[in-house]
Image (cartoon, coloured by chain):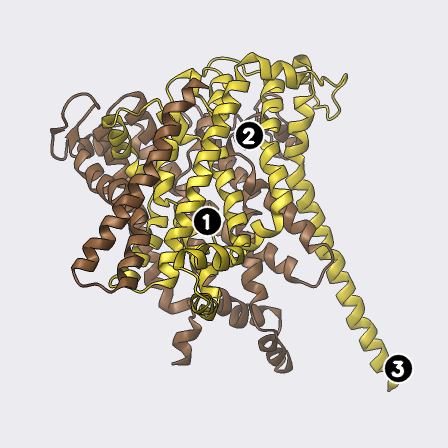
Chain colours: A yellow, B brown
Amino acid sequence: MENIAQRSINLKSSKKIIGKVLIYIILIMLTVIVFIPFLWMLSTALKSEADVFSWPPDWIPKPVQWNNFVDAWRTMPFTKFLQNTLFVVLLGMVAELISETIVAYGFARFDFPGKNLIFVILLSTMMLPFHVTLIPTFVIWNKLGLIGEFDPLVLRAWTAWGPFYIFLLRQFFMGIPIELDEAAEIDGSSPLQTFLYVLLPQIKPALLAIGVFTFKGYWNDFLGPLIYLGNKEKYTMNIGMYFFLGGINEAPKWNYLMAMSTLIALPVVVLFFIAQKYFIEGIAFTGIKD
Amino acid sequence: MERFVGTFIRWLITPVVLVLIAIGIYHLLKRLGWKHRQAMGLSLISPWIIGFLSFIAFPLVNSLFLSFTDYNLFNKPEWVGLRNYQWLFTKDIEFWPSIRLTLSYAALTLPIGVLGSLILAMLLNRKINGVGFFRTVFYLPAILPEVAVALLWRLFFNSESGLLNYILRPIFNLFNMGKPNWFGDPKFVLPAFVIMSVWGIFGTNTVVFLAALQGVPRSLYEVAELDGANFLKKFLHITVPQISPIILLQIIMGMIGALQVFTVAMFVRPTSAAGKFLNQLVYERGFTQLHMGEASAIAWVLFIIILLLTLLVFKTTPAWVYYEAEAKR
């Protein structure tokens, strides 16, 4: 009796172990699949031009061309493009963080007629395809005489144009007990003081997550700079890359392009690893994606 | 640094103007008899309302209007009725292939994306070591700049000597075919884009699903196990209903995303013969050919497709989406 029971337990646990091993094998295989293109990017970035299309493909560049990074950077005014990108990223990020926090605070802590309807409209704008409003928006900036300037990329950030982030911040505000506000008011703090010293510290994780999201958003943006920045003086990194790629009939310099791609990806990857915890919690919290 | 000054000053002035407007709104509402906190609330959200009215509501209506006009940015829009749409549906040789490519891409990638990331999230939801590590790895493709990813794919899919064709060589030999010209051949563009999207699905979706799965009460599974439910039964009768609102969200956002391929296509650059996505057509007609009317018409066709599909999905929700609050009533 005992023996049979023991055996069935053994069977069960060995079945479990096999299941676990299988899961690990699948996960490791997927990890490899995720990494193959990355490694290929790095490997190509370090190859000489002649080696890029060697057949059969070679994983290890010989010799390793470290100066590809420097040479690629010098083919276009990338230092200028980097300054432009950082300018746009910084202005957009700061404006969004401030305006979205204020708007979310309004939605979370105040009641007024029409609030729920407005909030539903706000959420539904997430489903609006970007290209539908693209042309009239371009016309507006054109009428204002700001085509070719950075303005169309950053001024709108002041109007809290990220519905996801407003939603996320509102959730965070609503998670703070209202008694905290009331206690502060009894102690004689003004609404502004309550907001700054009581509520803001509580939503720090959300602000960090949104900081990373918006950094990534402005850094990765391509369409905006493509239609609004006509002058080479004001190109961002991504637009620089687009022209670096060359015309349809030109043969791209793949080792340089991969070196630049690596450099463009680097800041986002580093930032992601630093702020990962908040970043992933942020998405998990709201179910957002960009 | 001179090139930054103008924008920076206007960037500083904008919030000042917005605050002044908000204060004006507050006083106006007070005068209309609103209570202090009500007026305060609306003033706080007024920046968003201003942005919405001027950069979403107005452009939306305006682009519908423009789609019935001939407009090149310099002349006044000239009313032409349905001519843009007529031209698109009957004359523009790139329109129907583009509709077909865009819709087939969405139809193929959406189920793969939603199901694939759900399965991956379920694997990660097992009690295994290193969940954090795998979650991070699978999230990586989602944060990279699309520009870098697209360039990488273009190299990877290179028809003559790209790594993908090298890896897939045994399969091509099996079917006795040559190396496919992924972005130059209409037969292969769609599969190429689907392969790219599959690589990207290990991303945000998985993280969202994982969080949703972790919210399903364990007790439900334990009760089901006592009743002798197998894996499939537990999946269909507990997991799916419990996370169905999240599945709905993923389907809708995934669909909208899949219909809006742009940046990757611009960098990968399939040849004209191979096909273009709708958003590429909007860009080309509008910003390289300056046919703003026709571009608006394409954008509206895309918008209406998205609206109809979203409505369709919502129509099916009573059958499968389970809201706890309603069930408790």
Count of all numbered marks drawn on residues in the image: 3
Provide the residue designation for mark 1. B110
Provide the residue designation for mark 2. B148
What is the three-letter code of the residue carrying label 3?
Asn
Vertical position of residue B202 compared to residue A148: above or below: below
Subunit bearing disc 2: B
Q: Is residue B18 left or right of residue A85?
A: left
Q: Residue furthest bottom?
A: A1
Residue A81 horizontal/vertical position (percent): 50, 21
Subunit bearing disc 1: B
Residue drawn at x 28%, y 21% is B289
In whole angstroms, how far apart are the C-alphas of marks 3 and 1?
51 Å
Which image quadrant for residue B296? top left
Provide the residue designation for mark 3. A3
What is the three-letter code of the residue carrying label 1?
Leu
Residue drawn at x 62%, y 31% is B164
- Determine the secondary structure under disc 3: helix
